[in-house]
Amino acid sequence: MPSHVSAEKRVRQTAKRTAVNKNRKTQVRSAVRKVEEALAAGDKKAAQAAFKAAEPALMKGVSKGVIHRNTASRKVSRLAKRVKALSG
């Protein structure tokens, strides 16, 4: 355990920031999962709607620093390709 006041403060700050980042990352994962579920069900309309919500969620994750820019771009690209390929 930390024995300096500043070190104790860093522990508190880190715990707070970890909780916030965990929540942000969960929101991103949930948005992507909704697209995946719609794709698995073969529902093009739902997949498109979920994708429209997932793309900004991924980019917000990038701006907040919880996921890497290239990772988000890759996910958006692959999801868009799969939504576009969905027949119906």
Image: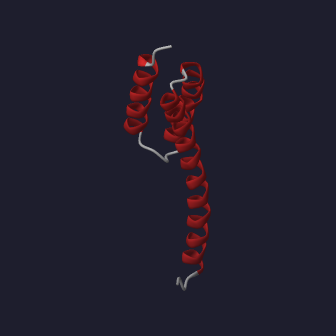
In the displayed structure, 5 sits above or below 56; it is below
The residue lying furthest to the top in this view is 88
Residue that appears at 56% across and 53% down: 21
Front residue of 4 and 65: 65
Front residue of 86 and 6: 86
The picture places residue 7, in percent across and down from the top left corner, at 54, 76
The picture places residue 18, in percent across and down from the top left corner, at 56, 60
The picture places residue 45, in percent across and down from the top left corner, at 58, 19
Picture quadrant where residue 43 is located: top right
In the displayed structure, 10 sits above or below 67; it is below
In the displayed structure, 70 sits above or below 23; it is above
In the displayed structure, 6 sits above or below 1; it is above
Picture quadrant where residue 5 is located: bottom right
Q: Tell me if 79 is positioned left or right of 57 in this view.
A: left
The colour scheme of the drawn protein is: secondary structure
Residue that appears at 41% across and 42% down: 68
Residue that appears at 56% across and 72% down: 11
